[in-house]
Structures are given as C-alpha cells and as structure tokens.
C-alpha cells in the first residue's frame, strides 16, 4: 500500500511539474535561427542571478523586456533558484560590466558576494525591431561565479517573417495561451507585440539549457 501511495505521489508530482512548465513539452527543437551549447553543469541545482542584458547601440529600450522575461522562463523551468537583478539594483550594487571580452574572476566573485548566487546569466541584445514584423538578435551566457566556466551559451536571430519561426510561435502560443488561445488575433498577436515576443524568445532560450542541440 505504501509503495502504491509513493508511486502515485511521484506521478502527481511529475504532472504538476509539466503543467507548471508548459514550454518544456515542446516536441521539437527551436528554429534553426537558435544555436546553443550546454554542459552537464548547466542543469545542476544552482542559485542563478540574471543581470540586465546589455543593449547594443541603436537598440531600443523595449528590448530590455528580454532579461526579466528570461528570468521568468528560467524560474519556470524549475531547475534553478533564480534571482532577477533589476537595473536599479545593479547600479546600486555597482556590479561590474561583464559583457566586454573576457570575464574577470574578480567580477564574478563580486556578483557572487552581492547576490549570493553560484552562477550568473549575462546577455547582449544586438538587434531588436519592435514593430511588425518583430525581430530579435541576442546572445546569452550562463557563467559559474566560482571558476568562470561557461555552463551554457545561446545565440538567436529570430525574425517573424520566417515561416519556421511563425510555426514555432504558433506551437508555443497553443501550449501557453490557455484561455487566450481563442483570442481574435491568436498567435499572430505575438508577431506585433514586443512583450509577448520577448516571452516567446525567453522560453525558447530557456528550453535549450536542458536539451542538447540536434546533430
């Protein structure tokens, strides 16, 4: 009887996790415009800080939505304890700029001491067009605060004019929209809504942490 109850509890726990992390059920890899490399250490139980992503010159402030969106996606993934470091807090903590060239160990230790985190996510948005059709180019890295090892990296170039990206957005929308799935514009609203598009991009990026790239 105890074995039966234990088995039932495990099954219910698994179902709960799937419903909490719907984008984890995506049956296919992201479009070819998403490339990544991940290591076994990337899915260890870590406390992870997500710093505000750097914006390249001429990239609008709307692209700043990507860093909080990614922190939410990472939290929903259920692997890491996630801390979002907002822009104001980052300035107040005087955290170093980790986006230029090689990351100094002293800078990583400063992040660890300021946030109590084992690893940090840094990113840079190279391109962002918030008008229809929305497009985004960015690179993200998960770096150990202890030894500077790069645990995961991803680069994406998402352009909603591409058919494969549109198909992927449609699948993402149907798995995540819930009651909004029957909205008038449906998944096509993502093509012209920067905030929703950043949520989609963030979910797609987080998905790659626990999955190996196709050969």
Image (cartoon, helix red, strand yellow):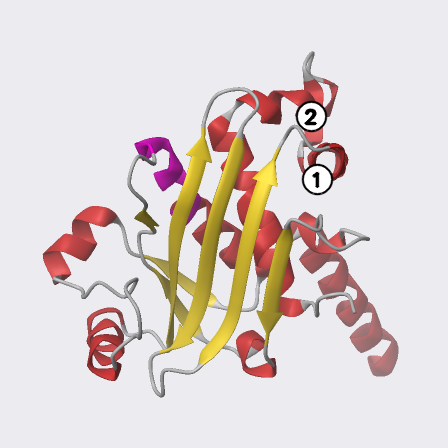
Magenta stretch: give its range: 60-67
Residue at the extreme top of the image, as rendered: 184
The numbered dot on residue 187 is 2
The question of residue 66 being in magenta is answered with yes
Mark 2 / mark 1, whichever is N-terminal: 1
- Give the main secondary structure of the magenta stretch: helix
Please say if the residues under marks 2 and 1 sit with CB atoms less than 8 Å apart: yes
Left or right: where does residue 50 sit relative to residue 193? left
Quadrant in which the C terminus appears: bottom right
In the rendered image, residue 148, in percent from the top left (x then y), is placed at 36, 82
| Viewer can see residue 5 | yes
Is residue 76 in view?
Answer: no
Q: Would you identify the image quadrant in which residue 95 lies? A: bottom left
List x then y, in percent, for residue 126: 41, 46
Up/down of 193 relative to 93, above or below: above
Task: Determine crowd level at label 2: few under 14, some 14-19, many 20+ residues with C-alpha closer than 10 A.
Answer: many
């Amino acid at each position: 009887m105890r074995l039966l109850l234990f088995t039932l509890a495990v099954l219910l726990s698994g179902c709960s996790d799937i419903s909490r992390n719907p984008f984890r059920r995506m049956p296919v890899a992201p479009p070819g415009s998403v490339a990544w490399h991940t290591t076994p250490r990337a899915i260890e139980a870590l406390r992870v800080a997500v710093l505000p992503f750097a914006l390249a010159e001429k990239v609008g402030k709307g692209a700043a939505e990507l860093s909080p969106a990614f922190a939410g996606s990472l939290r929903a993934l259920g692997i890491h304890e996630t801390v979002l470091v907002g822009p104001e807090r980052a300035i107040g903590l005087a955290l170093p700029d980790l986006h230029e060239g090689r990351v100094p160990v002293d800078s990583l230790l400063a992040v660890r001491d300021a946030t109590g985190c084992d690893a940090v996510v840094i990113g840079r948005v190279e391109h962002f067009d918030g008008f229809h059709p929305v497009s985004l180019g960015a690179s993200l890295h998960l770096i150990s605060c202890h030894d500077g090892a790069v645990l995961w990296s991803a680069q994406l170039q998402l352009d909603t004019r591409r058919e494969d990206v549109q198909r992927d957005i449609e699948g993402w929308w149907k798995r995540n929209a819930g009651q909004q799935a029957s909205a008038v514009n449906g998944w096509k609203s993502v093509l012209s809504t920067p905030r929703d598009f950043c949520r989609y991009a963030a979910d797609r990026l987080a998905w790659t942490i626990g999955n190996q790239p196709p050969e």
